Image (cartoon, rainbow, N blue to C red):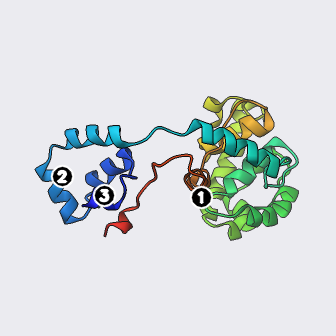
């Protein structure tokens, strides 16, 4: 059946999403109608295996040997530049961001420069990054918030960082870890993908397109 074919490697959360948005095929929908969904979820919880912590420790140790000097691939000179570069990296490669930021940071040297600029001017420097209009508005707003609410300084807590325009938990964790040396884990789609390939988890997200 469908569950056997996918080897039970679908997350409970993603399964609920597929059902809520009607993104599942008729045969699975029929199965959902026939069986009690709550009972099915209870069964799935029992079948999903726990993370292999021992394997995780071995993988981490080996990665430390292979990449002893691993650093952030974004090029920056100060915390503000890292924050901005990370915002630009959304839906864009770090390599492309590193090509764009030299001219950007030459024009906008501090939060005051971003705050006093216009989104249109910022956009001219970051067009090749993709989603540049949205990012330009965020950088302009980011400068204003940092000037008006934080005296031009970056906040030092995750809770405050995620309140900044355009800044999510991934970027906030990067600032906490790389800038302030606080315990932080930067997890994105690459982290999820690599974790699955290394066998650290058997639970992966099955995209709706695989069923349709």
Residue 163 seen from this side: no
Query: Of label 3 and label 1, which has the lower sequence position?
Result: 3
User: Would residue 96 appear left or right of 69 to someone viewing this image?
Assistant: left
Alpha-carbon span between mark 3 and mark 1: 43 Å
In the rendered structure, find residue 4 and report the number of the disc placed on it: 3
**Residue topped by disc 1:** 134
Q: Residues within 10 Å of mark 1 (few under 14, many from 20)?
A: few
Q: Where does the N terminus fall, quadrant-wise?
A: bottom left
The nearer-to-camera label among 1 and 2 is 2
Classify mark 3: helix, strand or loop: helix
**Residue topped by disc 2:** 32
Query: Of label 2 and label 3, which has the lower sequence position?
Result: 3
Q: Position of residue 112 (x, y in %)?
A: 80, 44
The nearer-to-camera label among 3 and 1 is 3
Q: Position of residue 139 (x, y in %)?
A: 69, 51
Which residue is at the front of the view, 14 or 40?
Answer: 40
Alpha-carbon span between mark 1 and mark 2: 40 Å
């Amino acid at each position: 059946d469908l569950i056997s074919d996918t080897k039970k490697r679908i997350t409970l959360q993603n399964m609920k999403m597929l059902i809520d948005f009607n993104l599942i095929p008729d045969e699975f929908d029929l199965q959902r109608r026939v069986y009690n969904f709550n009972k099915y979820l209870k069964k799935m919880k029992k079948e999903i295996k726990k993370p292999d912590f021992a394997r995780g420790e071995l993988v981490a140790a080996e990665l430390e040997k292979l990449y002893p000097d691993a650093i952030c691939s974004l090029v920056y000179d100060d915390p503000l530049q890292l924050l901005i570069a990370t915002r630009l990296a959304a839906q864009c490669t770090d390599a492309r961001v590193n090509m764009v930021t030299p001219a950007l940071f030459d024009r906008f040297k501090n939060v005051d420069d971003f705050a006093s600029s216009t989104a249109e001017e910022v956009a001219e420097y970051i067009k090749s990054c993709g989603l540049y209009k949205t990012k330009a508005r965020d950088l302009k707003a980011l400068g204003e918030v940092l000037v008006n609410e934080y005296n031009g300084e970056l906040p030092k807590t995750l809770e405050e960082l995620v309140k900044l325009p355009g800044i999510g938990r991934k970027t906030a964790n990067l600032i906490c870890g790389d800038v302030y040396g606080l315990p932080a884990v930067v997890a994105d789609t690459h982290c999820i993908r690599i974790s699955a390939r290394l066998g650290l988890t058997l639970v992966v997200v099955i995209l709706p397109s695989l069923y349709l």
